[in-house]
Structure formats: C-alpha cells, structure tokens
Image (cartoon, rainbow, N blue to C red):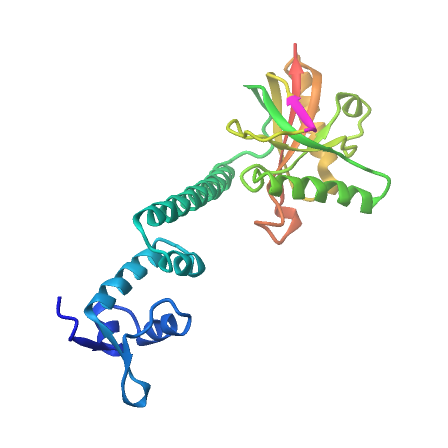
Amino acid sequence: MNSKIYLSTGELAQMLGVTKQTVIYYDKIGLISPIKRGEKDYRYYTLEQADELDSILTFRNLGVPINILKEYLSVRNAEGCIEMLRKQKEKVDLEIQKLDKIRRKIEGRSRLLEQVLGISDFEKVVFSTESKEYYMIEPCMEENEKAFMQSFIAICSRSKELQIDFENPICNIITKEALELGLYKKVTYFGIRIPEDFEGELTNKYEKSYGIYASTYHKGSYDTMYLSYERLLNGIKEQGYSICGNAYEVDLLSTLTNADSNEYLKLISIQVCK
C-alpha cells in the first residue's frame, strides 16, 4: 500500500461517510491523530489510517465506548479484541433483555386497552373459571389519606424496581369478611400480578386461588363503587352462588387514559362457589 498518499480531513471523512467534525473530534481526544500536519495546521492521514478509522467506526457502531476503545488501541492485539467484543456482547445481551421486557409491557397494556374498547355491556355480571395467580402485595394503611397513598406508592415503586409494572395494573384486594359487612372501600392489600416468567425473590407474595369468579365493571368515580358492588352481589345471589373468597379491583381506564373521572373503569371480581 502506498503510504505516500495522504488524505485531508475532508477527503477522509468523505471516504468513510462521516463528518469532518467527527474526524477532528477523534483527533482531539487522542483516538486517532493525523500522520502529519501542513500549513495552517491542516491534518493529513495515510491510507492505513483510513483503514484504522474505518475499524474504529465499526467498533463505535457496535456500541464500544470511546474510553474502552482508546484503552484497546493502546495495546491492540487479537486477544484484546476478542475480550473487548465479548464484553460488548454481554452488554448488548443485557440491553436486548431490557428491551424485550419493555416490548412485553407495551404489548400487555395495549392488549388490555383493546379488550376494554371491545366491551359493550359494562353492567353485565359474568361467571368464569380463573387459574391460580400470584401477586406481590403491600398492606394498605388506612389511618389517613396520606398513609393510604404511601402504601400505594410503595407497591408502585417496588413493581418498577422489579420491572413488572405497566403491563399489570395495580389492584385492590378486599377480604371476604369486609364484603359481607358491606365495607367495599376497606382495602386490605394493594397487589400486582407476578408474570409467570418472573425469576426474582419476593417477600410479600399472595396467592389468588383457582376457582369460579363473578365479575362486573364499574364505570365512574370511586365514590359510586358501592352501586357496582350491589349489582354484582345481587347477580351472585340470583345465580345461586355465595361469596367464598376475596374481591379484586383492577383499574382498566384511569388517570393514564382519561381526564374525566366519570370515564374511569374498574373490573371487580369476587371468588364464589355454589
């Protein structure tokens, strides 16, 4: 290769499809410097350097950080290149896992909203057999409104840490005993469903039992929830069922999707038996 051929900064940039500013920047940070400088401090590079810069750009496109790349270039060898690429692959694999979780969250929430938009009768009482599920829970403190919100924020924060938020709405869990006393607002736990593929450790784990559940929707503010509970309990009684488990309230449409509280939508489910 003829090392007597020199390329200006503009020619090198044009050859490799980058800007002159990129070439100049790499010189300033010591990643690759010109073989010589001419009048007015013009930079000149050899063809070998063009090949070297092309390799550097490839590594940068692979996401290798500049500081790691500088370290490698100071001692460059095949073993070091393999090690650098191995570490970068590990980072890419972790990023893929993260993006896959984000994708599943988006798909889960979109799927939920699409199902909601397909509902034609919000007051219908439906009976269905549901599988066993596990929830992460947080005891609901009801001393005052501030304590109540602190409990809710605690489970929201924990679900974000575990990356199980967004695709699974937070639900309110009301005990069978509270239902029988008509205390529909007495939330015992806040819960969030744990995905089947979740591999982390949980201390507050709750099992939602397999069985038959009666469910209906509540549309409107929380203040009128009792009307939907009365409708649901009447439907349970009319079909010859009785309450044998807890109630679960899941937000389907709330502040995230609606500005008007009259358009909020909850799904209420209660475990029943004959």
Where is the N terminus found, in terms of image quarters?
A: bottom left
Q: Residue 33, position in %: x, y?
A: 33, 72
Q: Nearer the viewer, residue 169 or 230?
A: 169
Whether 126 is among the magenta residues is no
Where is the C terminus found, in terms of image quarters?
A: top right
Q: Nearer the viewer, residue 12 or 168?
A: 12
Q: Residue 258, position in %: x, y?
A: 59, 51
Residue farthest left in this picture: 2
- Give the vertical position of 210 relative to 54 (above or below): above
Residue farthest bottom in this picture: 40
Q: Residue at x 61, y 20 (%)?
A: 213
Q: Which residues are magenta?
A: 203-207
Q: Residue 41, position in %: x, y?
A: 32, 86
Q: Residue at x 72, y 36 (%)?
A: 225
Q: Residue 116, position in %: x, y?
A: 52, 38
Side of 171 where 180 appears, left or right: right
- Give the vertical position of 80 relative to 134 (above or below): below
Quadrant housing residue 73 = bottom left
